[in-house]
Amino acid sequence: MSAHHAHDILFPALPYDMKPRSTRAAGDIQLQQFVNSATRSKDSGRRSTCRETFGERYDDLRRYAGSIKQQTLDHLDTHINRYIDNAQKHGVHVHFAKDAAQANAICLEIAQSRHCHVCVKSKSMVTEETGLVPALQAAGIETVETDLGEFILQLDDDAPSHIVTPMIHKDRTAVGRAFTRELGTPYSQDPAELTKIARDHMRALFQKADLGISGANFLIADDGSLVLCTNEGNADLSVGLPRVHIALVGIEKLIPALSDLPIFLKLLARSATAQPITVYTTIVKGPRQPTECGGPDEVHVVLLDNGRTGLLASDARELLRCIRCGACLNACPVYRKVGGGHAYGAVYSGPIGAVLTPALLGLANYADLPRASSLCGACREACPVDIDIPGQLIRLRAKLVDQRSMPWSERTMMKAWTWTLKTSARYRLASRLLRWAATHMSDSVDAQGRAWLKRAPGPASGWTVGRDLPAPMPQSFREWWLREHGSHRP
Amino acid sequence: MRVALFVTCLTDQFYPRTGIAAVKVLEHLGCHVEFPLEQTCCGQPMYNNGLHAQAAALARRFVTIFEPFEAIITPSGSCAAMVRRHFADLLNSDPAWRDRAAAVSARTYEFVEFLDRVLKFNSVTAGVRWPGRATCHCACHLRELGLFDLPRHFLSSIPGLDLAPLAGAEQCCGFGGTFSVKYVDPSMAMVTDKVDALIASGTTTLVCNDAGCAMNIEGACRRRGVNVDIKSIAEILAEGLGLLPREGHG
Amino acid sequence: MNTPTAGESRATFLSRVQRALSAPGRSPSHHAADHTPPATAELARLVSPQADLPSLFAANSAKSGMHVHRVDKSAIVSTLSALLAQSPGAQVALAITDSVLRTLASQALQAAGNPGITWTAQQSARVWFDVDIAITDVTAAVAETGSLVLACSPLLPRAAFMVPPVHIALVRTSQILPDLLDLLAGDHSTPQGTLTIVSGPSKTADIEGILVTGVHGPGQLHVVLTP
């Protein structure tokens, strides 16, 4: 991956072909095992903590959380208006960005007009979406990612491969090398030592920073506050120390009331990292109030659309419920195998990426993503806001068929198959033909009398890359039934 | 009870013994089993690939064929989930079919589900005995029916059967229908995990209640020279009740 | 305030949202009302008000990695001075709103022979970068998660509990709320202003999933819990 730059990893040439990256990731046994064990342990941690904590209530709770978000989305205009009015009461400046370019321009204009030179940034997927950091840096504003994982990626000009644990694809030796090369510190591969190096480096920056940038985990309509959840404490420092703070926030982050927040806090950290709550949960009302001491002079919230109203207007609206916990990535067997190689080709990866990216950036550009799933449903089971990801994948597949984006050969084959299945006579004839052909091509027969193929032709050839393919049995169930019972049941 | 067996295409062609076992077990339990010969496919491959008009045609066909029966039983979790969960997506907008489809969906059961939930089957009182060690792969589509753990619970109650845990049992085997031939890299990596887990389980008998998963895992085992006996729960029960001879290496 | 010229107006932005909401032909939300459970936030309650809150708080804050010292009121000074004596020469700062607790903490400093500093609102937040140990009180605590809740005040800036490597928090058992639901009810009982809910020492597992404490916030957190 080091041959790529961060931007090319998340914004590849379109239409995006998933195969090269997924082949490379699946072929890198070390990477795959690494990501596999990390995601599996997070997934099993999530399962056990959710089961132990909520017991029988768990499914009802995630449906309830999903319904809160859904109802908010269904009346999003009202909630945005309430949020703006309430945030302004605390002195927050609210801005409106239609797309990435506008969002970056707003942030840049704020930074420049306030003469900010050093920016401490906390982790935010939405800033990846808009490419904010390169935009600030191009304008001469020194911008440092302060989340440890994002900081390391920034040093390596690499991109996040996971929503919550962005450098899940890197090991400690890569971190040690990056620090030695970029910070000039002696090589170490001890995580505690490496963390200390990063801490020391960033403390100097926190002291001189005049701009803090974050996203937000939630915006609360009825009291105009924004909520930041982190484990490291970097978001608190970036909102607490510099004189100007900007939060870039997608409009799907709204929840109606402060009293709804506990439900999401309880689900978010358990789903993400099997913690009861993130170490730091900060509910920011706005700039420093008269009763407060410390905190920014100005707080700006930039509300971002960037394709979200398109989702809102579509039958994919439920995707906007996502609280970015990453549980579906950890649960997904496909992500476990190829996610470490940035195979999803966009900012959001894993199951949620597979449905969100085509919806935001065009299905024709990302036709592979909805197809590259076994529809096992683990993502749906893991989702704390009950998003029907497999259903959305199938919906996108149907759209591909409607748009004639399914290859002609495949479509024709599926239609011919359907035609065959429409009468049992055709089905019987076709299965006899298949059995005859497969038995002829087979190279061995097992103890049950089943013939096996080592190499299958045409569309089935993918199967036999690493698996033998069975031929139909010499006697089908139907043939047995007819022999035993005749054509009619007595 | 007059029940219909929906055997499914893959079971019909590749694992007919599962269908035979299901018939024998259901008859043993007093059901009057019929096999409507007109049946073919529930339309799942078309539905999953987005050909919803084609899937709907097959769904209507399924409804017509299976309507006359008190219960429709299938030895496949994914086909049961197709009928139960997705026929509604396909046919709800059609007033002529909506209620008929819903009625058939409500009477369609996965084989183990039918035994457990409808017949209240108890393997001890039923006199099942299946001495031996086995492990269990739960088919993912049972998740949609809220039955993911049922096969494991069911097997662990069978006298004589020593159920070995399977590491990473919650992870898909990588079949996923056309996914297995179109996205070979992740699919192969997934089935490799499953074969590794099977080897680590210390048994060669894998109980698997879905023909697609069975083909995938058995095919991968054969390629790697790993010994495996794949059996459905219907076969375990039929063998354990003496309705079919015990088969397999162990 | 000079408004940036970039971006859209509120009206333009919201009209696009409204258009999206009224888009024709959008199939109804998957989230059909029939499978949404009738529920209130109480569904998420994990701790009832009748529970033994001090014990639960102590157990959960210990689970999150805090060191909990559950002592009698009369032992606050000795507990604090014992903690301070472990780090001779450390720069200690007090940021305590409650005057009784502030006095007790000052006595502890004296007892430990540590000059210490008491924060005043006139100082710059940068001061905290030279502090090794901060002693604060809290606005509230939550038994469910073992969390400390800190609201800023002229005597307690945010930097106090975020910047120094060691944080000692003074908590009274009467401040413990059962559940996050009770903290964030959104009514008059919810503390005003910016709130930070602290649930353990600063943590990361970004490098190979290995847990390391003390990334940006304090790596060591002591709770002195008194009736």
Image: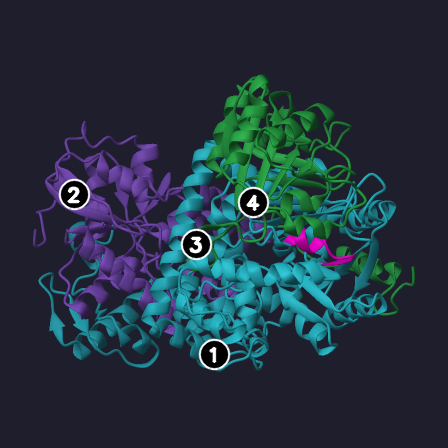
- Which sits in the foreground, B87 or A161? A161
Indicate the amino acid at tag 2: Ala
In this rendering, position of residue B65 left or right of residue A286: left
Residue at the spot of label 2: B238
Image point 47% across, 44% down: which residue?
Answer: A274
Question: Would you call the spot at circle 1 few (<14 residues within 10 Å), some (14-19), or many (20 or more)?
Answer: few
Quarter of the image for residue C207 reads bottom left
The residue indicated by pointer 1 is: A2
Q: Are callouts 1 and 4 both on one chain? A: yes
The residue shown at (78%, 28%) is C188
Range covered by the magenta-colored residues: A235-248
Residue located beneath label 3 in the image: A331
Nearest to viewer (mark 3 / mark 2): 3
> Do callouts 1 and 3 point to residues on the same chain?
yes
- Percent x, y for residue A464? 26, 75
Residue B66 visible, this angle? no
Mark 2 burial class by Cα count in 10 Å: few <14, some 14-19, many 20+: many
Subunit ID for the residue under disc 4: A
* Residue B72 in view in this figure: yes
Report how far apart the C-alphas of labels 2 and 4 lie in the structure: 52 Å
* Foreground disc of the pair 2, 4: 4
- The tally of labels here is 4
Say which of marks 2 and 1 sits in front: 1
Spatial separation of the CA atoms under disc 3 and disc 2: 35 Å
Chain name for mark 2: B
Q: Colour of chain B?
A: purple
Q: Which residue is disc 4 drawn over?
A: A278
Q: Colour of chain C?
A: green
Q: Judge whether C74 appears above or below A251 on screen.
A: above
Dot 4 amino acid type: Thr
Which chain is in cyan here?
Answer: A
Marks 4 and 3 on same chain:
yes
